[in-house]
Each structure stands twice: as structure tokens, then as C-alpha cells.
């Protein structure tokens, strides 16, 4: 899972850290505020895994067939995926996302991150 849930998890950790750093403004004394980046990443990974497994379990418990791959909607009741044809009464389409790297002259000569690198990074960046 990429995107909203991982981002929200990381942002919550950042906001909590920032609140602790500025707690004295509100009469709350917190000394030696720090964070453990590896624990933040582990928490994000655990939450995402739990969400993905929960969604899959809920869908399969309602007899929803999960299909992964590049699929094509043939008509209102037919899907073709990986050369196999599926008939259905209803369908849920989860498209996922692809990273778009804009055509900026010289971009290939500088290091950059897409959302995937930012969310999958295991080490705190230098800046």
C-alpha cells in the first residue's frame, strides 16, 4: 500500500514529536524530546500491513474474488486479467498509482525522490 495511509502515519509521528518539542508553550514540561526513526518506520509498516490484511480478509469473507494484475473491463459484467476472463455481478476497481516524473531538463543528473522512495526510506535523510 502506497500513499495516504503511510503518509498519515508518518505525519502523525512528526506532529506528535513537534507537539512535544513545543509543549512548554502550554505549560507542559517535556524534557529530552527525541525520536527513534526506525520505530516510526516499523510502526508505519505494521499499520499498513494490518490495513491491507484487514481489507483482504473483509473482502474474502464476503466472497469477493480478488484479482491482481493489469486488467481490462470488457463489458459491465466481464473483466479480463492475465489472459483469464472473469464474469461478475459487481466490481470494485482499485487502480493503484504510478509515479509521474515530470520532463524537467537535467532531472536525470540530480538525485530525487518520488513518493515511493520517501515512504519506503529506512534511514533519516541528512536534510
Image (cartoon, helix red, strand yellow):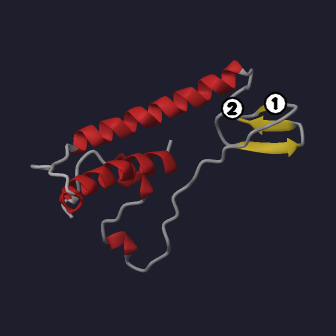
Residue 81 falls left or right of residue 78: left
Quickly name the residue at label 1.
86
Residue 87 falls left or right of residue 8: right
Given residues 20 and 116, the one toward you in this image is 20
- State the image coordinates of residue 44 (x, y, percent, origin top left): 37, 40
* Vertical placement of residue 124 versus 67, above or below: below
**Callout 2 secondary element:** loop
Report the residue at 86% width, 36% height from top.
78
- Give the mark nearer the N terminus: 2 vs 1: 2
Given residues 107 and 97, the one toward you in this image is 97
Q: Are marks 2 and 1 in contact (CB under 8 Å)?
A: yes
Report the residue at 27% width, 45% height from top.
122
Residue 61 falls left or right of residue 13: right
- State the image coordinates of residue 46 (x, y, percent, origin top left): 39, 32
Report the residue at 81% width, 31% height from top.
85
- The C terminus sits in image quarter: bottom left
10 Å crowding of disc 1: few (<14), some (14-19), many (20+): some
* Vertical placement of residue 1 versus 114, above or below: above
Give the total of numbered labels: 2
Q: Which mark is residue 67?
A: 2
- State the image coordinates of residue 76 (x, y, percent, origin top left): 90, 42
**Callout 1 secondary element:** strand
Residue 24 falls left or right of residue 76: left
Report the residue at 81% width, 37% height from top.
79
Q: CA distance from mark 2 to mark 1?
A: 9 Å
10 Å crowding of disc 2: few (<14), some (14-19), many (20+): few
Residue farthest front in this picture: 27
Q: Which mark is residue 65?
A: none
| Image quarter of residue 94 | top right
- State the image coordinates of residue 83 (x, y, percent, origin top left): 75, 34
Amino acid at each position: 500500500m502506497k500513499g495516504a495511509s503511510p503518509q498519515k502515519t508518518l505525519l502523525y509521528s512528526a506532529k506528535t514529536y513537534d507537539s512535544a518539542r513545543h509543549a512548554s508553550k502550554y505549560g507542559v514540561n517535556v524534557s529530552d524530546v527525541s525520536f527513534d526513526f526506525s520505530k516510526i518506520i516499523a510502526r508505519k509498516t505494521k499499520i499498513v500491513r494490518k490495513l491491507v490484511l484487514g481489507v483482504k480478509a473483509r473482502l474474502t469473507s464476503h466472497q469477493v474474488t480478488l484479482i491482481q494484475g493489469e486488467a481490462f473491463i470488457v463489458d459491465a459484467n466481464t473483466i479480463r486479467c492475465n489472459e483469464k476472463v472473469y464474469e461478475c455481478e459487481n466490481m470494485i476497481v482499485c487502480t493503484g498509482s504510478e509515479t509521474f516524473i515530470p520532463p524537467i531538463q537535467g532531472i536525470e543528473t540530480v538525485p530525487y525522490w518520488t513518493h515511493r522512495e520517501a515512504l519506503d526510506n529506512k534511514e533519516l535523510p541528512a536534510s
